[in-house]
Image: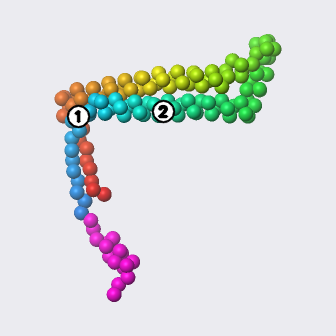
Amino acid sequence: MSSVAEKLQRKSQRATATKQVRLKLVYIDFWSAVKLSFLIALTLGIIMIVASMLVWVVLDSTGIFGKLNVLLRDILNDPAFSVTQSFSLGQVGLFALVVALLNTVVGTALGAITAMLYNFSVRITGGLLVGFTNN
């Protein structure tokens, strides 16, 4: 009688036949492309908001804003100048939110335009040939 390990070893040594299927991508659903591009743009917007606020917190906690205040006060000859008053966490967050909203709108529109252009170009090119295997 053979052990389970020997049976598995014999089983893995057999060559498996791989099937390959070749298909042409001749149509992209417009609304699916719009929904997917919206979700990707929204995710990137959220990442940008969190990253910008995190960078501000790190710069503030490491004291870079304090050194920048001293440098800019010397350059501008203004003893009341403060970088943290000009660029507070709320202002940075609001600016990042506005840019994220604009990027979401533009990203969604670009996804829709790309899907339309691909669907129009398929009439000329015949589509994109894609190969799949069963690995």
Q: Is residue 125 left or right of residue 96?
A: left
Quarter that holds the N terminus: bottom left
How many C-alpha atoms fall within 10 Å of the one at disc 2: few (<14), some, or many (≥20)? some
Image location (x, y in percent) of residue 79 = 81, 14
**Residue under the image location 25 percent in, 47 percent down:** 131
Q: Choose top left, top right, bottom left or bottom right for residue 90.
A: top right
Asked whether residue 75 is in view, the answer is no
**Residue under the image location 58 percent in, 22 percent down:** 94
Image location (x, y in percent) of residue 53 = 62, 30
Furthest-bottom residue in this view: 1
Q: Which residue occupies the foreground of this view, 76 or 50?
A: 50
The residue type indicated by label 1 comes to Tyr
Q: Distance between the residues labelled 2 and 1?
A: 26 Å
- Does label 2 or label 1 sit earlier along the sequence? 1
Secondary structure character of the magenta stretch overall: helix
The verdict on residue 4 being magenta is: yes
Coloration of the structure image: rainbow
User: Could you tell me which secondary element the residue under label 2 belongs to?
Assistant: helix
Q: Choose top left, top right, bottom left or bottom right for residue 3.
A: bottom left
Image location (x, y in percent) of residue 112 = 33, 26
Q: In this view, does 22 lie to the left or right of 114?
A: left
**Residue under the image location 26 percent in, 50 percent down:** 132
Q: Which residue occupies the foreground of this view, 34 or 71?
A: 34
Q: Name the residue under label 1.
A: 27
Discs 2, 1 touching: Cβ within 8 Å: no
The residue type indicated by label 2 comes to Leu
Image location (x, y in percent) of residue 39 = 41, 33
Q: Which residue occupies the foreground of this view, 63 or 125?
A: 63
The span shown in magenta is 1-16
Is 73 drawn above or below residue 27 in the view shown? above
Q: Name the residue under label 2.
A: 44
